[in-house]
């Protein structure tokens, strides 16, 4: 889905000949003793919509501020188009930023805010009004051109901030939690507008968010950060389906984690012993694992089926009792307590109207899943 | 709760009487026809005309005005710069010392400020006159400006300045085209504060002035020593009128600005 949204087969990170727009080379940023960004290496390509995802305080804003030029890396280099931008001050970088607080100029009108950067560029004076009007049209704010920032709504302010940052046609646009202040409905609508604008302008976007759904919706690639380090950089579907660590699996979406030991392996197929007297769980692993390795089996709730009888041909089947049911409208999540005490979540879509639910509290049920549904993680 | 009890009324009356009776008496006696300050001899405006002919007072008024304009402007420029460095400069060597020192004149007895400035001017051989008074007033009113401006800067979203840099401003251009317009109200009220401080300063001016540049407060004070004259009352009444008009205008203007902004915000919320 993501790939279609960004043009079929858009995957420059897989092409070894492709030159990255941005390259981080061992970038570390320290504030005194505290390491906010830790030996970071990553390439970002032209036309990407690159999302930085991570808990609060993990260094996302710091990373953006280094790109914009407000912070200097303590170690390492940042290359833009192959050139080290370390010595370049913010006002000389072909990078613009949309601030978390929007940072609109309160004493200037919407149109003047948008024109602000253009007046300081080498654009001829006569072309500025046309460009401002074009940007106003792009964010649908033509009738508000003369208003001051305090005279428009939060959603409109956010669009002014976007238009202002895009007006100079930067090579790279940085968006720091751009939608944080909006309510859920407006946020979803704006996410699609962002993708739309990104495609129209062809600008490379780097977006910071702590909302994983947002990252999954808009991004070509998602980078999951923790404590100043990049844990995994991948497409949204691979981040979700093939997390490289327990941290990523747990951070993105809902997951069941069962700890155990590798009993035997055969290619990608891994058998895990996880509890006395229980059948081995069969899962898959992207990397080869030695028998006896400590590991976690991770499986998403929607990949766990729930039934009253043991499905005859299931590879993995475990019995338990229903501990809790969370009804979420479109789906229901059953929390099933296994005989070992583990709680495993199983999700089913509610295709039927309520009233004829199959299971209720304390029912004995079977959980089953295929051998490729869950993955084995060691990190 | 909010009823006017006899206690409230008494307290209010006493308080206001305490504050304003001296001023009211002064104003009334400025319209006294008699030369004797304590004897009422009917209404007259003649002292005001006398005043207009009094070269000494007019000169002093002119000196005071020049000093106040020059020193408040200089104090505003320096105080704003100091405030900017302290709020925005980040941590630099000696910052705490610097910020402590800039506020010292607030608590320093005026006599000491005046004396030390006098010693300085003598030491460097500076002829005392209008210029030295301007320097002295700039020195002590600058810290008031810097307090007013730095409290505004502290509540100011730093990222607005960064946005200006991001959009291609040099640091100076960002200050001029973004920071300054936003903090302008604080800068203006700092200027007004410095202006009034300079206008009514007696102590520091007496230390630092020369014979040919007597300021109005000094002139008033020295003529009082020869006896209170109705002319002084007239002059004081004019000053009171000017200050009152100034204060009322300033508060009306700022109230109007706040009301307008509130109305605009409500309109924006409604759409
Ligand atoms: N100027 C600074 N001085 C000291 N510490 C800072 C500074 N800026 C950020 N930090 C610290 O660096 C860490 C990462 O901050 P930040 O990049 O803002 O996180 P995020 O945007 O991911 O929430 C935080 O722990 C924060 O306290
Ligand atoms: Mg942040």
Image (cartoon, rainbow, N blue to C red):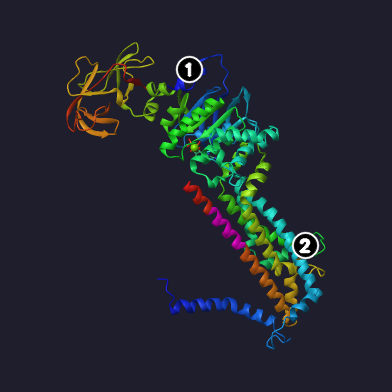
Q: Which residue is the extreme one toward the front?
A: A143
Callout 2: CB less than 8 Å from ligand 1: no
Q: Which mark is residue A289?
A: none
Residue A288 in the image: state x and y as whole percent. 37, 14
On the question of residue A108 being in view, the answer is yes
Residue A191 in the image: state x and y as whole percent. 46, 32
Of all chains, the one bearing label 2 is B
On the question of residue A26 being in view, the answer is no
Please, what secondary structure does the residue beneath circle 2 have?
helix
Q: Residue at x 21, y 21 (%)?
A: A278
Q: Which residues are magenta?
A: B250-262
Q: Residues within 10 Å of mark 1 (few under 14, many from 20)?
A: few
Does B137 sit above or below residue B1? Answer: above
Please, what secondary structure does the residue beneath circle 1 have?
loop
Residue A364 in the image: state x and y as whole percent. 17, 27
The question of residue B258 being in magenta is answered with yes
Q: Residue at x 34, y 15 (%)?
A: A290
Separation of disc 2 and disc 1 at Cα? 77 Å
Write down the residue under mark 1: A8
Does B164 sit above or below residue B230? Answer: above
The residue mark sitting in front, 2 or 1, is 1
Callout 1: CB less than 8 Å from ligand 1: no
Of residues A128 and B17, the one nearer the viewer is: A128
Q: Quadrant of residue A93?
A: top right
Write down the residue under mark 2: B132
Residue A349 in the image: state x and y as whole percent. 28, 27
């Amino acid at each position: 889905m993501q790939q279609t949204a960004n043009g079929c087969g858009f995957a420059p990170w897989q092409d070894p000949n492709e030159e990255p727009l941005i390259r981080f080379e061992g970038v570390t940023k320290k504030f005194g003793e505290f390491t906010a960004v830790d030996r970071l290496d990553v390439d970002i390509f032209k036309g990407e919509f690159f999302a930085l995802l991570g808990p609060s305080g993990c260094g996302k804003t710091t990373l953006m501020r280094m790109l914009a030029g407000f912070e200097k890396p303590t170690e390492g280099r940042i290359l833009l188009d192959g050139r080290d931008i370390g010595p370049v001050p913010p006002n000389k970088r072909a990078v613009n930023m949309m601030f978390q607080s929007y940072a609109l100029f309160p004493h200037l009108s919407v149109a003047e805010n948008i024109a602000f950067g253009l007046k300081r560029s080498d654009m001829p004076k006569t072309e500025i009004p046309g460009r401002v009007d074009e940007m106003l049209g792009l964010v649908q704010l033509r009738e508000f051109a003369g208003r001051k920032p305090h005279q428009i709504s939060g959603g409109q302010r956010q669009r002014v901030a976007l238009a202002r940052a895009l007006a100079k046609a930067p090579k790279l646009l940085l968006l720091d939690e751009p939608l944080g202040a909006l309510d859920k409905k407006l946020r979803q609508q704006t996410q699609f507008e962002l993708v739309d604008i990104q495609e129209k302008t062809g600008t490379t976007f780097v977006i910071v968010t702590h909302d994983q759904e947002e990252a999954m919706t808009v991004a070509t690639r998602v980078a999951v950060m923790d404590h100043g380090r990049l844990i995994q950089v991948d497409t949204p579907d691979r981040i979700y389906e093939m997390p490289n660590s327990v941290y990523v699996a747990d951070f993105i979406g809902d997951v069941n984690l069962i700890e155990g030991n590798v009993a035997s392996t055969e290619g990608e197929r891994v058998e895990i012993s996880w509890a006395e007297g229980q059948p081995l769980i069969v899962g898959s692993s992207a990397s080869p694992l030695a028998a006896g390795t400590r590991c976690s089996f991770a499986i998403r709730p929607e990949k766990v089926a729930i039934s009253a009888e043991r499905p005859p041909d299931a590879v993995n089947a475990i019995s338990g009792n229903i501990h809790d049911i969370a009804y979420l409208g479109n789906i229901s999540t059953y929390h099933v307590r296994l005989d070992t005490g583990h709680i495993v979540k199983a999700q089913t879509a509610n295709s039927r109207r309520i009233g004829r639910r199959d299971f209720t509290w304390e029912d004995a049920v079977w959980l089953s899943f295929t051998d490729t549904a869950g993955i084995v993680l060691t990190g | 709760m909010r009823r006017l009890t006899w206690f409230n009324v008494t307290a209010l009356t006493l308080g206001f009487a305490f504050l304003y009776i001296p001023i009211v008496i002064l104003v009334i006696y400025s319209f006294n026809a008699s030369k004797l300050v304590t004897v009422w001899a009917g209404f007259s405006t003649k002292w005001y005309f006398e005043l207009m002919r009094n070269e000494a007072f007019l000169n002093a008024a002119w000196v005071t005005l020049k000093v106040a304009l020059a020193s408040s402007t200089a104090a505003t420029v320096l105080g704003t710069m100091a405030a900017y460095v302290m709020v925005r400069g980040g941590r630099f060597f000696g910052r705490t010392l610097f910020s402590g020192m800039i506020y010292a004149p607030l608590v320093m007895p005026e006599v000491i400020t005046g004396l030390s400035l006098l010693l300085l001017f003598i030491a460097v051989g500076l002829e005392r006159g209008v210029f030295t008074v301007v320097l002295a007033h700039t020195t002590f009113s600058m810290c008031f400006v810097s307090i007013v401006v730095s409290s505004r800067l502290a509540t100011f979203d730093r990222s607005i300045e960064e946005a200006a840099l991001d959009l291609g401003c040099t640091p100076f251009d960002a200050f001029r085209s973004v920071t300054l317009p936003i903090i302008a109200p604080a800068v203006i009220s700092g200027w007004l504060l410095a202006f009034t401080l300079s206008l009514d300063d007696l102590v520091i001016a007496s230390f630092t002035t020369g014979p040919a540049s007597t300021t109005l407060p000094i002139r008033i004070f020295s003529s009082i020593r020869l006896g209170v004259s109705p002319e002084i009352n007239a002059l004081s009444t004019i000053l009171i009128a000017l200050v009152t008009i100034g204060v009322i205008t300033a508060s009306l203007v700022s109230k109007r600005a706040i009301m307008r902004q509130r109305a605009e915000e409500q309109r924006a919320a409604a759409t």
